[in-house]
Image (spheres, rainbow, N blue to C red):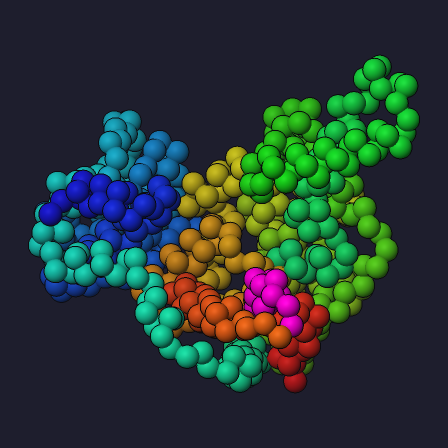
Amino acid sequence: MNIDNLLLNLKNDHKLSENEVNNNIDTLLRSVVFEDIKKKKINFVRNYKISEKAICDLYLFDSYENFEGPIVIEFQPYIDSNYFHNLLNHLVFSSNVNYKTLLIIHLNDFYPEEILIEEAKLCGIEIHFIKKSFINKIINRNKNLTEKIIKNLFSIKIKEAVFNKEDDWKTKRSNLILELKKIYNESGKTTLLTGAGISCSANLPSWNELISGLFITYLININFDNSELQDIKAGDFINSIKDINKNFSEKHLKSALLSARYLRKGLATDDKENSNDFIDILRKNLYKNEKNRESKLIEVIGKLCFPTRTGAKIHSIINYNFDDLLEQHFEKLNLKNKPIYFQNATYTNEELPIYHVHGFIPEYSNNYNNLELIEMVFSEEGYHRMYSNPYHWSNLVQLANFRDNTCVMIGLSMDDPNLRRLLDIAQNGNPNANHYAFLKRVTLSEISTKNEGESVIVEVSFLERHHKLQELIFKELGVNVIWFEEFDELPQLLGQLLN
């Protein structure tokens, strides 16, 4: 048995995407190496904190094979120069060195600059790249476990989801809310994760509406100086713009990240994602609805965040939205807060930190400083930049909260691959689900067009299994699902956490 054959089988037999293959191989490598270390009775810690800004995958207090301990192990199936430089900066050059060997377990061919290896030696650290021959040795030493892992990687407990009758989900929801209420009131270590549902509740555009607005702006801009349009009536021009927007968007701008990249490229005057002109266009489209900004959901979030006589119950907020609606509402409540939107930003003990991990576009820019330091994650290239850098400040903030706090996800669809990846890393074999996500159930009317009186047994049965399977999948990521049927229910459900 060798790793090349496993890779080939994963790609051919299971028809997986490249990302899915990489994730499964990563899981396999971690599990087999972890088991091998346990067999040798070596003392170790997973997700060990090397410094304030660096967490390693595995820290061994003793020697392993022929490598001198203490040892730091990093798993990264495919590495490049950017990854290696970031790794050195965080684990070697900028940390208090308390280990002797760095092992990087990877699969691709990579040849580092020799001078970097020598500089690491001057810091007292030997770097070794663990390649396929060593991996094959460990796999064959743990053949039974390897076969078991490969078999289980693709099941995701489907049988349990299909054959177990779903519990009364509303009763289960009540129990989960009681559980969360106790944590919220007693721990002081609750973090809110807020997504687009929060902003939409205050009449800001959804992602699709924002993209549509930007596309219309783009169409108007490119035709602004077109002399051939002088004789066209204004009404005809507007109708043409609407038709192009509807038909072209539906057929050719299906991918959220691709369409964002397309529009950024078309609207910006330079090639930067955070260029001033592009940010201004985004701001205008984001805040164009000035009326009906009142939101019961934001109001209840304000109540949850407001400190009591016993102290603050919310530790922090991780906001995946660009807007500053929460900050605006907190100012009205005189609730001290600090938006964090760039690396090394600081806050005081009296301030509630609000981490804008995808970027920040406040309604009035003169209310904030250092906006030029923001790294926007709006389109494909911004997302790739953040995804590929495990030491990006936003990834470290999320990982730290997933590891140390109870996170409550509100207004998130939970389909962001980077969010799920970070949850998976933080979970790392932990059987307990410590986080909670408020998610909307799929309704019968969304999947069936049958008339009243017609049998919907198959559809109802499918929905029961679907929701159960979703719960199982999120459980693997360490997340308990609190279901609701209509978005209007959210403020009332969150309000149950308050005394």
Locate residue 330 relative to residue 121 in the image: left or right.
Answer: right
Quadrant housing residue 228:
top right
Could you tell me which residue is drawn at 64 percent across and 68 percent down?
451
Residue 10 is covered by the magenta coloring = no
Quadrant housing residue 34:
bottom left
Spot occupied by residue 398 in the image (x, y as percentages of width and height): 49, 56
In this view, the residue farthest toward the top is 227
Spot occupied by residue 236 in the image (x, y as percentages of width and height): 86, 30
The quadrant of the picture occupied by the C terminus is bottom right
Could you tell me which residue is drawn at 45 percent across and 56 percent down?
420
Report the number of discs.
0
Spot occupied by residue 281 in the image (x, y as percentages of width and height): 74, 36
Relative to 211, say whether 52 is above or below: below
Front-most of 84 and 215? 215
Could you tell me which residue is drawn at 41 percent across and 79 percent down?
165
Locate residue 258 relative to residue 113 in the image: left or right.
Answer: right
Relative to 222, say whether 261 is above or below: below
Residue 340 seen from this side: no
Spot occupied by residue 396 in the image (x, y as percentages of width and height): 46, 52
Q: Main secondary structure of the magenta part?
A: loop
Residue 269 seen from this side: yes
Front-most of 66 and 435? 435
Relative to 251, say whether 358 is above or below: below
Could you tell me which residue is drawn at 43 percent across and 59 percent down?
423
Locate residue 222 relative to residue 346 in the image: left or right.
Answer: right
The stretch of residues the image draws in magenta is 440-452
Front-most of 194 and 215? 215
Quadrant housing residue 498:
bottom right
